[in-house]
Amino acid sequence: MKLFDLSLKLNGFPIKEARKALTSIQNIDETDFETYINQKKEEIVNHHLEHNSFYKSFAKNANPKDWNRIPVMTKRHLQQPLNHRLSEGFHIKNVHIHKTSGSSGDPFIFAKDKFCHALTWAVFQDRFSWLDIDLNTSKQARFYGIPLHKKGYYKERIKDALGNRFRFSVFDLSDKQLQKNLDKFKTTSFDYINGYTSAIVQFAKFLKNEHVILKHVCPSLKYCIVTSEILFETDKTLLETQLGIPVINEYGAAELGLIAFQNKHQEWIVNSEDLLVEILDDDGCILPYGEEGRVVITSLYNKSHPFIRYDLGDIAMLSKKSTPKKPILEKLIGRTNDIAELPSGKKAAGLTFYYITKSIIEDDGNVKEFVIEQHTRSKFKIKYTSDKALSSENKKHILTDIETYLEKGLSVEFEKLDQIERTKSGKLQQFKSFL
């Protein structure tokens, strides 16, 4: 029985119709695809200008035929009561309601109409089929957060059962719990792993210490799909070595669905079927393929709630090989609020600190996780979990590299912790600025 499809259908999400629509979109010829995109852009803007009072007020000077005059919206614009943002004909009883994780610091509640939500899942099913994974039948080992209050907890557990998945805790990454995780893999025929990058990396480090290749104890495993956090090349190598399976990078957002998904050829294919992904500069101008900038996305099918030229808060680059039908994500740099501002006036991606310190800290052999905080323009703190404190030599190496790659005069404090605090959703925010 296709429990996953059935659960969508019983909740009013027309998955069969959505899959049919997706196939129709995918059958549009490359030469006609830009026309399809332009038509859907104009349609969704006209719809919300006519039927959504919030958007009508927000985009009062918008011209649907002139895309450059369509304003960019941010999460801050959407932080108001949901019923103020719903289009005519939609209310909380006939839409899918969800909340963003808040990892960007700006959480809010949003809505998707039922066809739009079904189309989101049709895209997920399509992409997973690239890997011969069927969401109805393939067993998933899920490394995600879970609400800790009773109602939300049991709701997620029911969804896990219907989705044929077993959820592992990302809040407890102790050796004792990771051993329990390993024992579960020994007795369950999982087809794939899916979840937060940092939690799966911690599991892989545990496997390395135990001299275990996961595929050897769970032969049914085919792929590991990581999402929600940056995947570093060194971590990818670790995962593929210790899990014994290929690692696939997924990029998504709760309010939009699947944004990009790697295929078997390691191409990070952007979802062009129901989303329009643009890369903009600081002035809001569209950048050509091959240049990095702000990720701005339009949901082409969400009629209940406008996500039109919505600034996701990420920085990325599309490949020069991209086409309107097949955009390719070249790289995902990080979040726009992950920018470090230095005393000299220089700005650097906050993850620069993470890159600089990562290899040295991990070479120490005892450090499990670490994050970096900026408290003033010149003062930074590195928090880490470890069985013992970092050596003076490694601290000196880190300070020297920071000075070499960034600038002199920066103060770095080290703080050893028993556990690093994650967001409520269970994600690990690797760099955080308090400026």
Image (cartoon, grey):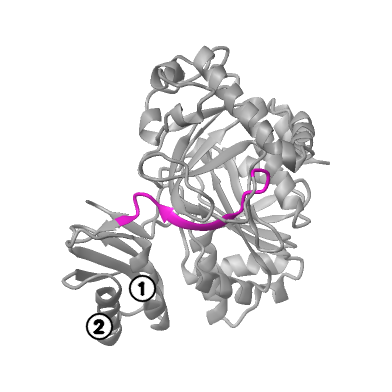
Q: Quadrant of residue 213?
A: bottom right
The amino acid type of the residue labelled 2 equals Lys
| Label ID, residue 292 | none
Q: Pointers 1 and 2 in contact (CB under 8 A)?
A: no
Tell me: residue 382, above or below residue 296: below
Q: Where is residue 114 drawn, in percent x and y?
A: 64, 26
Q: Nearer the viewer, residue 86 or 192?
A: 86
Q: Quadrant of residue 411?
A: bottom left
**How far apart are labels 1 and 2 at the CA level?**
13 Å
Q: Which residue is mark 1?
A: 356
User: Sequence-wise, which precedes: disc 1 or disc 2?
Assistant: 1
Q: Which circle, 1 or 2, is nearer the viewer?
A: 1
Q: Quadrant of residue 115?
A: top right
Q: Any magenta on residue 221? A: no
Q: Where is residue 381 drawn, in percent x and y?
A: 24, 65
Q: Residue at x 50, y 67 (%)?
A: 232
Q: Which residue is mark 2?
A: 396
Q: Is disc 2 surrounded by few (<14), some (14 to 19) or many (20+) residues within 10 Å?
A: few
Whether residue 416 is visible to the viewer of this picture, yes or no, is: yes
The amino acid type of the residue labelled 1 equals Ile
Q: Secondary structure at mark 1?
A: helix
The residue furthest right is: 1
Q: Where is residue 422 drawn, in percent x and y?
A: 39, 55
Tell me: residue 119, above or below residue 347: above
Q: Residue at x 61, y 69 (%)?
A: 182
Tell me: residue 178, above or below residue 293: below
Q: Name the image quarter holding the N terminus.
A: top right
Which stretch is magenta?
324-339
Q: Nearer the viewer, residue 13 or 172?
A: 13
